[in-house]
Image (tube, rainbow, N blue to C red):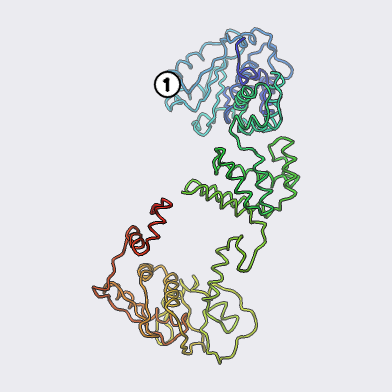
Amino acid sequence: MEYIVSARKYRPLSFDTVVGQAALTTTLKNAVKSGKLAHAYLFCGPRGVGKTTCARIFAKAINCQHPTAEGEACNECESCQSFNEQRSLNIFELDAASNNSVEHIKTLMEQTRIPPQLGKYKVFIIDEVHMLSTAAFNAFLKTLEEPPAHVIFILATTEKHKILPTILSRCQIYDFERMTIRNTIDHLKHVAQQEGITYEEQALAVIAEKADGGMRDALSIFDQAASFCQGNITYEKVIEDLNVLDSENYFKIIDLSIDNKVSDIMVLLNSVINKGFDGGLLIQGLAKHVRNVLMARDPQTLPLLEVSDQMRERYQEQAKRCQIPFLYDALKLMNQCDINYRQSSNKRLLVELTLIEIAQITQPAEDGASAGRKPRRLKSLFKTLIQQQKPKTTAPQVAAAKPAVPTHKQAEPAKPNKPALSLDGIGFSWNNLRNKGDKPTKGGMQVIPGSINLPTGQDKETDAQFSQTDLEFQWMSMCNRMPQKHSGIATRMKNMNPTITEFPQVEVVVDNELIKQEIEEIQGSISKTLQIYLHNNSLKLTVRVAEQKEKVKILSRKEQYDQMAEKNPAVKKLQQVFDLELA
């Protein structure tokens, strides 16, 4: 006996046997019962959900001479018999993917003029109608607009957006739904029982997920799994045959993450990669798993889990052990990893770092020199650095709005009230940057746009000591705060290296006279800013053009590496041992 694949063998022959499209089939049956038929229908939806099948069932029911009370074809009259035996002269099918020219459509339109010999209507089913050329659409449009009374068109497509709006406006449009996991599993159970195949429901769930909403795809995968498993479809054999990552890995990773067992997760990741699975695939599957765990926490969202009953129980069990903040943070980390995965040059390291961060979400913060397991957050690191460089204040309101100038040690101490943290205390605010501009300060001095004038009574001269490192840090900070109109000179100043010649004298060496003139235009502002943040009002800034012998060639990365390797042979040896390349 000739073998027929399940997708053809179990193709629905009536509306009642169509899976997952109950609302749509009910509408079509009611149209048959009432006799209120449109002259054109458009069936659209993803592949393998029953568009062409429903078109054939509908065409047979339309021409049935004795339809049932429910609107189904009787399968006994001559019209139904001729259709079942594929000899009907009233139903025509055209594949627009291979017959998309004007000539094919004109030939079809000629057939519409001939009335049906048996039955009431001539039905024309055009599959993949979006593949018609523009000229073919135009040739089809006039007949579609005013067809003969005995003609009904049923168009089917997977890409509705490619069809001309003038065609859409003349059709009744039916949107087919994707198959749910539950519907697919139930149908596969029915097919397995008819074929005498034993199965595990969890194995059928894997097949349903792999099919991604298409029943035809699910039946094709089912046939493949049945052949591999030799009539006994088990979960282990299905994931082996389809090369699907076992969901048990996801449950283990989350359990280990809750317990902060980073080492065990790294071992598990290594075993997954050694089996040939991609790290990005693991992250995507884990993200879907965490989403399901999140849905399983609330009875309202539990129906959103498209999994088998056994897996739903497992998700509920794990959801009881997972806190919502942990699930939210884990999803954010995996989403960021998925975004960066394609551009990453070291994909495995990216996946490992993501899993490490997930495993440390529930780990309490650790302080002290021995706290090495949890990585320091950059935000905390910068906060510490800012507090070290922040000018001291004498009153809360000064700290909240303006950078303060420190007083002498014998000055009266500040009030005990805790000052409010403000960005104005660590740099220039954007409001001042836009509004204050080049407003003159006392004595006609121009302050760098964005800086803040000294408070009244706080401009006493100070003589604090500062190092070369302090000078370079404040110089770079000042360059970063300069407004947009000074962006050009600010960029050049970042490459300059101010030096302390004779304390507190500071000298800046520039390449040419033009740059010197640009800096001299705002030299007073630069000096005033450095005096404020280095706490030394005696600081003097001088600018001079470099002599020929002082000009240094700017080295490329290759030249910088060669220079380092020449000074330190260990660098060259490191490059050879690890086979490193210069990025």
Identity of the residue drawn at 30% across and 74% down: 510
Q: Nearer the viewer, residue 328 or 467?
A: 467
Q: Secondary structure at mark 1?
A: helix
- Quarter occupied by the N terminus: top right
Image x and y of residue 89, in percent: 56, 10
Q: Which amino acid is tagged 1?
A: Val
> Is residue 306 toward the left or the right of residue 422 in the image?
right
Identity of the residue drawn at 62% across and 24% down: 228
Q: Is residue 232 visible?
A: yes
Image x and y of residue 511, in percent: 28, 72
> Is residue 492 toward the left or the right of residue 327 in the image?
left
Image x and y of residue 74, in percent: 70, 13
> Is residue 420 toward the left or the right of residue 26 in the image?
left
Question: Is 413 above or below relative to 143?
Answer: below
Question: Is 265 above or below relative to 410?
Answer: above
Question: Is 276 above or below relative to 43?
Answer: below
Image x and y of residue 258, in percent: 69, 52
Residue underneath mark 1: 102
Q: Residue furthest left?
A: 548
Report crowding for label 1: few under 14, some 14 to 19, many 20 or more residues within 10 A (C-alpha).
Answer: some
Identity of the residue drawn at 46% across and 21% down: 98
Question: Is 524 above or below relative to 342?
Answer: below
